[in-house]
Image: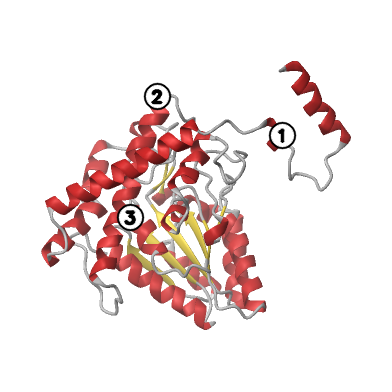
Amino acid sequence: MGTGKARRPSGLDLSDEKLVELLRQMLLLRTIDAKMLLLQRQGRVAFYGPVSGQEASIVGSSFPLAAEDWIFSALREGPTALLRGMSIDVFLAENFGTSLSSQKARQMPCHYAYRGANVVTWSSCIGTQLPHAVGTAMAMKYRRDKNVAVGYMGDGATSEGDFHVALNFAGVYKSPVVFVCQNNQWAISVPAKMQTASESFAVKAEAYGFPGVRVDGNDVLAVYKVMKDAVSRARRGDGPTLVECVTYRIGPHSSSDDPTKYREAAEVETWKNRDPIERYRTFLTDLGLWSRELEATVQKDLDAFVQSGIERAESSPQPPVEWIIEDVYGETPARLRRQLDDWRSANE
């Protein structure tokens, strides 16, 4: 795992335009982080889980996927919905809880979902998305679809029973699934060295009979190449792969967390020097595909794009109270209808 400039691995099928798009997507995620954390501090959203420092792992792992593939995210991969076509308004409305929410404002902030690109809503119960990813992969296998499911997790999820259940089943039945572990060194306040006695998280795949690959998660092209190979393997019917992206969470676990209580500032500074955006920016500049002038233009456009989304999401109406019980039952129970009528009467 290198710590220098991003490298261009052999076997890439990326045009110059796509190489630039990778950086634009990473800059978009960091722009959203900066704005949403400010909004949370202002009390305009209740909670936010930043992704800063992990942009290369997120963008690089989602870029090789086809539109028909399925994504089961953890806390920091929800932005894949935005990268796969979800509108910025609806994406941000999931944090504001307004009526633009595609999930009727029923989910917690940062629990994104986008039916249009098969991005399934996340559960705060750690690791539960992994068996779901395997189940979806098996359904596609039975239907002879050539699509792939991706199950994301943090390093902490590898200590959950669902991790072992999912990997064991996928290995036995050669499920067309790719498991992606973002090893960002910290499961909230638990360091990775206290999460496992194994030499890596990737090596755990060997016990279940399929490959595990450890990749520099701050090198977007290395992540893309490894993920592209894993997706191709699953699509061919050769079974799953566990990809461990070694990266770092630069900021807090969430807006509710104070990381200074459990990790040293020197450690953070070390990883800031491996910033995936800075590394890839340097790489594209060396190729003649990026410049300060281009970045100023791109950043201006991203700022306006995100700000307009914030304004539309925040100013959209509050969800109607009826959404609390709509779609929950095929036929709404009488007691719930009475409760809704009582609420209406009390608030007229």
Where is mark 3, residue-wise? 25
Where is mark 1, residue-wise? 322
Where is mark 2, residue-wise? 42
Q: Earlier in the sequence, mark 3 or mark 2?
A: 3
Instruction: Answer whether residue 199 is visible to the viewer in this image.
Output: no
The foreground one among 308 and 68 is 308
Mark-to-mark CA distance, 1 and 2: 29 Å
The foreground one among 329 and 305 is 305
Residue 121: percent from left, percent from top: 57, 51
Q: Quadrant of the C terminus?
A: top right
Q: Which SS class for mark 1?
A: helix
Q: Residue at x 26, y 42 (%)?
A: 268
Name which residue type carries label 1. Answer: Glu
Residue 218: mark = none
Residue 223: percent from left, percent from top: 34, 65
Residue 133: percent from left, percent from top: 58, 63
- Characterize the local packing of mark 1: few (<14), some (14-19) or many (20 or more) Cα atoms within 10 angstroms: few
Mark-to-mark CA distance, 3 and 2: 26 Å
**Residue depth check, mark 3 versus mark 1: number of the one nearer the observer:** 1
